[in-house]
Image (cartoon, grey):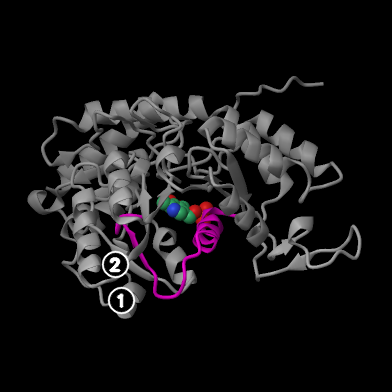
């Protein structure tokens, strides 16, 4: 039989000359493990979910983990599990994916934002405290803060924890971008600051299960609730049952959802997690290449890395001063795409989405630092299988396209 090269990437969905901002890295060891589960008796609700949960808890230093269908479902489970209710106030950052804010909407809560720090692009603790003070002055309590370790750069967690102690809100880390980031030399920092830590395993993230998510917590009650709500609100836990008709018997005390993830996805997750250190090292070396290339060029701002932090580079958010260079960003997108490089923009500030403007009255100018960041930001390709040659191609395409447009 032909020997399998465990490390050789075996999927390449990209047309030969197009580079997108993110892409999964799948090798033969991944497909082998997925196939093994696919040909076993249980392809869902088998043993793999718990195994993946144990591996995640161990790697990230949490007592409990619950895997879920995707990172949006896991955020919804956090919102329900933490007991967010109608009209509760939840504060998050405008520079995040919709789901960080939408999870509050799902439970009828009110979304508020605090602007980002101009250097780290994560929620600014000073701006957050102004919002907390404002609500205090209105005799309203903020229920929770969803902070996002944007792009893979941890927030200022010491300051966030101080604010949590002072104002008594629940603290969630939407950690989807920051797997293997370090805060004060600690890879397991996330659960030490937040009540719940949220993951997504979408293919552009550091590790993937296709679609997938997870919640980490050290709170056994929260973990229990999340696990029940993940599967229709059903429980077989004898201590919770009103009666017990037999081994088949279950009860539902509140409605939940089917937010489970399959066993074959978990098998992929377990195998991907083994490669996380390698994947993030590769991301860091790509970032180093970009940093060197763009650092001294006028018109560019490379991502800042704070002293206390090791970046995990889910994204490489490069800022280009399009206004100063007198270049139209939309035109730049199309010219660059013609050359084979397709950037994405992370993110359109959430408060400027029509739904948020209409529902909560947000408008342009409300969070100026986030809005300026959005004007300038482009996320350029960063994923482990990029080669030096690819990076040369990408950087030269960006430079040449801008030169031509000046
Ligand atoms: C910060 C953040 N939160 C939540 C999500 C939602 O995760 P998923 O796409 O797995 O539902 C994402 C995914 O893009 C994200 O980047």
| Ligand 1 contact, mark 2 (Cβ < 8 Å) | no
Q: Is residue 251 left or right of residue 269?
A: right
Bounds of the magenta segment:
69-96
Residue drawn at x 26%, y 34% is: 396
Label 2: few (<14), some or many (≥20) within 10 Å?
many
Earlier along the polypeptide chain: callout 2 or callout 1?
2
Residue 351 numbered tag: 2
* Residue pictured at 23% horizontal, 49% vertical: 125
Q: What residue is rendered at 37% in x and 44% in y?
A: 340
- Residue 294, position in %: x, y? 20, 33
Q: Nearer the viewer, residue 19 or 283?
A: 283
Residue 360 has which mark?
1
In the rendered structure, find residue 208 and report the number of the disc placed on it: none
Q: In the figure, 330 relative to 380: above or below?
A: below
Describe residue 253's horizontal placement relative to residue 385 as left or right: right
Q: Is residue 250 above or below residue 289?
A: below
Residue 277 is a magenta residue:
no
Q: Element under label 2?
A: helix
């Amino acid at each position: 039989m032909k020997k399998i090269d465990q490390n050789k990437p075996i999927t390449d969905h990209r047309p030969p000359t197009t580079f997108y901002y993110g892409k999964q890295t799948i090798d033969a060891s991944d497909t082998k493990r997925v196939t093994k589960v696919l040909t076993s008796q249980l392809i869902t609700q088998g043993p793999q979910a718990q195994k993946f949960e144990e591996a995640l808890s161990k790697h990230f230093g949490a007592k409990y983990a619950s895997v879920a269908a995707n990172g949006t479902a896991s955020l919804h489970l956090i919102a329900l599990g933490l007991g967010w209710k109608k009209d509760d106030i939840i504060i998050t950052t405008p520079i995040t994916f919709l789901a960080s804010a939408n999870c509050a909407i799902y439970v009828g809560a009110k979304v508020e934002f605090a602007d980002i720090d101009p250097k780290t692009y994560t929620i600014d603790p000073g701006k957050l405290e102004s919002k907390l003070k404002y609500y205090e002055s209105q005799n309203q309590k903020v229920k929770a803060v969803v902070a996002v370790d944007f792009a893979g750069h941890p927030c200022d967690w010491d300051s966030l924890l101080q604010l949590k102690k002072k104002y008594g809100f629940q603290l969630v880390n939407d950690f989807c971008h920051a797997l293997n980031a370090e805060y004060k030399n600690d890879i397991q920092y996330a659960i030490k600051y937040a009540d719940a830590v949220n993951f997504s395993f979408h293919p552009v993230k550091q590790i993937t299960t296709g679609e997938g998510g997870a919640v980490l917590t050290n709170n056994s009650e929260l973990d229990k609730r999340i696990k029940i709500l993940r599967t229709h609100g059903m429980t077989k836990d004898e201590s919770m049952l009103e009666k017990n008709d037999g081994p088949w018997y279950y009860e539902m005390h509140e409605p939940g959802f089917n937010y489970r993830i399959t066993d074959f996805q978990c098998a992929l997750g377990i195998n991907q997690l083994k490669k996380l250190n390698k994947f993030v090292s590769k991301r860091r070396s790509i970032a180093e290449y970009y940093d060197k290339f763009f650092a001294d060029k006028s018109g560019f701002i490379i991502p800042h890395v704070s002293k206390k932090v090791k970046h995990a580079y889910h994204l490489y958010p490069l800022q280009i001063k399009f206004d100063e260079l007198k270049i139209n960003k939309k035109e730049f997108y199309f010219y660059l795409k013609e050359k084979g490089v397709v950037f994405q923009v992370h993110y359109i500030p959430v408060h400027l989405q029509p739904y948020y403007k209409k529902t909560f009255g947000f408008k342009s100018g409300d969070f100026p630092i986030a809005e300026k960041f959005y004007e300038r930001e482009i996320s350029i390709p960063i994923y482990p299988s990029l080669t030096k040659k690819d990076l040369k191609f990408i950087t030269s395409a960006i430079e040449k396209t801008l030169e031509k447009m000046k």
